[in-house]
Amino acid sequence: MSEKLKKEFHAFKLLLSSVPSYVTVVFVMSVFAMNLLANKSISIPLDWLALDCGIIVSWAAFLTMDTVTKHFGPKAATELSVFAILLNLLFCLLLYVGSVIPGTWGESYVEGSENILNTALDNTFGGTWYVLAGSTLAFVVSAIVNNFLNYGIGKAFRRNPDGAAAYFMRSYVSTAVGQFVDNLIFALCVSHVFFGWSLVQCVTCALTGMVAELIFEAAFSYFGYAACKKWKRDGVGEAYFDYLGLKGEVVR
């Protein structure tokens, strides 16, 4: 067992060194940002519709997952997702420590409201356990769904698995399903239980959030497709593939 763990850890280190650094940075920061922004609900004049600000950045996390899945495979993308979640938890811990350190936020200097605003800012950046737990659970489950569904759809394109049609189809479908799962789990576990959202609001939030994020995915997915073609042309990840015994072949 220990030998297997050592091999898995070595493979993971090779993966981190093989995935272009900008992809890892965008992925980690998007996961962190979407969880922080999920604390803010968007004001919409419709009782049945509810959205949070996490939708403006969560598409980036799914775009990077789709790109990594296409080139490195679903297992690698899922491992990178868990890595991003662990770093997110570390950042959240640091923000919590900062929120409990005695002091005053710059934006709280409003006459007569200093204490109220300072407490509100501490609570926002310090976070709450249920938001963090809900977002972590939602993202882990949705990442697994997205990555393996993306891979499964890609396997159906046997004649031209590296073509544009194959990439866009696997990306759009897996992102739509993954985003719906992510939004629904978070809405049910957090917004429904702690914020009083109705079940209708939870479902509509999941659906409308999925549509909004899918639009972003459609707008920027070409960059993911172009990156995959460049990675294959440049032999990105050869050491990782060789270690896994894949002889440099991309895990489609």
Image (spheres, rainbow, N blue to C red):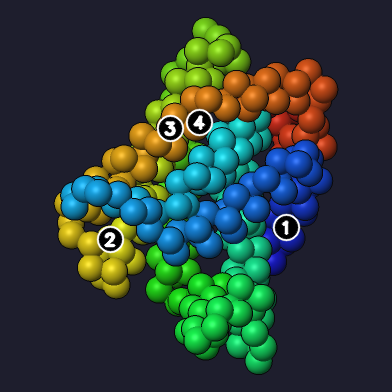
Cβ atoms under marks 4 and 3 closer than 8 Å? yes
Q: Report the residue marked by disc 3.
A: 214
SS at badge 1:
helix
Structural distance between the alpha carbons of marks 1 and 4: 31 Å
Q: Report the residue marked by disc 2.
A: 188
Nearest the camera: 37 or 120? 120
Which amino acid type is shown beneath numbered disc 1?
Answer: Phe
Cβ atoms under marks 2 and 4 closer than 8 Å? no
Q: Residues within 10 Å of mark 3 (few under 14, many from 20)?
A: many
Residue at x 18% of width, y 60% of height: 198
Residue 50, image x, y percentages: 29, 52
Q: Report the residue marked by disc 4.
A: 217
Q: Earlier in the sequence, mark 2 or mark 1?
A: 1
Structural distance between the alpha carbons of marks 3 and 2: 21 Å
Residue at x 64% of width, y 84% of height: 104
Q: Residues within 10 Å of mark 4 (few under 14, many from 20)?
A: many
Residue at x 53% of width, y 62% of height: 36
Nearest the camera: 248 or 207? 207
Horizontal side of residue 126 vs 98, given as left or right: left
Cβ atoms under marks 1 and 4 closer than 8 Å? no
Q: Report the residue marked by disc 1.
A: 9
Structural distance between the alpha carbons of marks 4 and 3: 5 Å
Which amino acid type is shown beneath numbered disc 4?
Answer: Glu
